[in-house]
Every structure is written in structure tokens, then in C-alpha cells.
Image (cartoon, grey):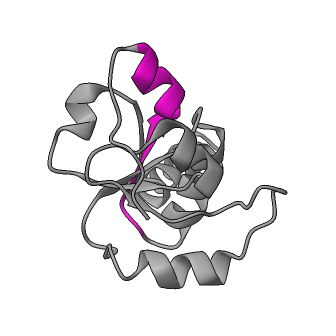
Amino acid sequence: MYKISLLIALLSTFLFAELRHVDASEEVVKSSIKIIDIRTLPEWKETGLVKNAIPITFFDEQGRYDADSFMKELDKYVTKDKEFALICRTGNRTSAVSELLSKQGYKVVNLKGGMKSLMSKGYTPEPYKP
């Protein structure tokens, strides 16, 4: 029984090896990692974006989503073999979306705390430009 439990633990580690959760910080956003901002247009207009972030909405303002459409747009900017990060307002949406993406084989980093946390630490986003 112990060997089976150990095997399951090891396999689950490998299954989720493509997902990391890190605190949103200026150090991370100023690194070379590509950042995808999954918030909505009104949120981008309100606070701005992390410098060089790519805005691709996942959930609309009513909480609806089209995962296939999002994935098609995402694939224009990232590949499965290169790590990238997701950011939203507080980290709730990116937590869910990063889980989905990691199960699809992407190497994704969930920026915990999102823009709210990042800005509370003194980070100043760039204004959103359509």
C-alpha cells in the first residue's frame, strides 16, 4: 500500500510540474517572462497593464468565457515549451485558468495576488493603449 501511495504522489507531482504559483512582484514582472493579462477591457483601462503584458480576456464582465477562442489567441503569443505568466486583478481568475492551461501542457506561472497586490507594493502600470 505504501508503494502505491508513493507512486501516486510521484505521478501527481509530474502531472502538475507545468504550473507554478508565485507572488506578483516587481521583480517577476521586470524579468524576461512573458505576461498575459486575462482581465477585462474596463479593468485594463482602469489600472493599466504591466509593461509589455499581452491583454487577452478570458472571462467577460458577466463571468462567461470561450476557452477555445482564448486558446487560439493565446497560441499567437506563447508556446507550450516556454514558460509564461498569467495575471488578473487579485489572482482568483489566474488560479483557475493556470490550472486549465497546465492540464493542456503549458508551462504557466500564476501570479498570486494579481495587479492589486502588485500595485499595493508600489508598482506603477503603464496606461492601456488599444
Residue at 58% of width from left, 37% of height from top? 89
- Whether residue 40 is visible: no
Residue at 33% of width from left, 27% of height from top? 124
- Residue 5 or 64: which is nearer the viewer? 64
Question: Farthest left residue?
Answer: 32
**Residue 23 vertical placement versus 47 (above, below):** above
Side of 59 relative to 111 (left or right): right
Coordinates of residue 53 in the picture (x, y in percent): 33, 54
Side of 96 relative to 29 (left or right): right
- Whether residue 85 is visible: yes
Q: Verify whether residue 46 appears in magenta.
A: no
Residue at 66% of width from left, 75% of height from top? 67
Residue 80 sits in which quadrant? bottom left
Side of 67 relative to 31 (left or right): right
If the image is split into quadrants, where does the N terminus sit? top right
How many numbered discs sit on the rendered protein?
0
**Residue 124 vertical placement versus 54 (above, below):** above
Coordinates of residue 105 in the picture (x, y in percent): 44, 71
Coordinates of residue 58 in the picture (x, y in percent): 63, 63
Residue at 58% of width from left, 39% of height from top? 2
Question: Farthest top residue?
Answer: 121
- Residue 84 or 55: which is nearer the viewer? 55
Residue 84 sits in which quadrant? bottom left
Q: Verify whether residue 119 appears in magenta.
A: yes
- Residue 78 or 88: which is nearer the viewer? 88
If the image is split into quadrants, where does the C terminus sit? bottom left
Q: Which residues are magenta?
A: 106-120
Coordinates of residue 66 in the picture (x, y in percent): 71, 76
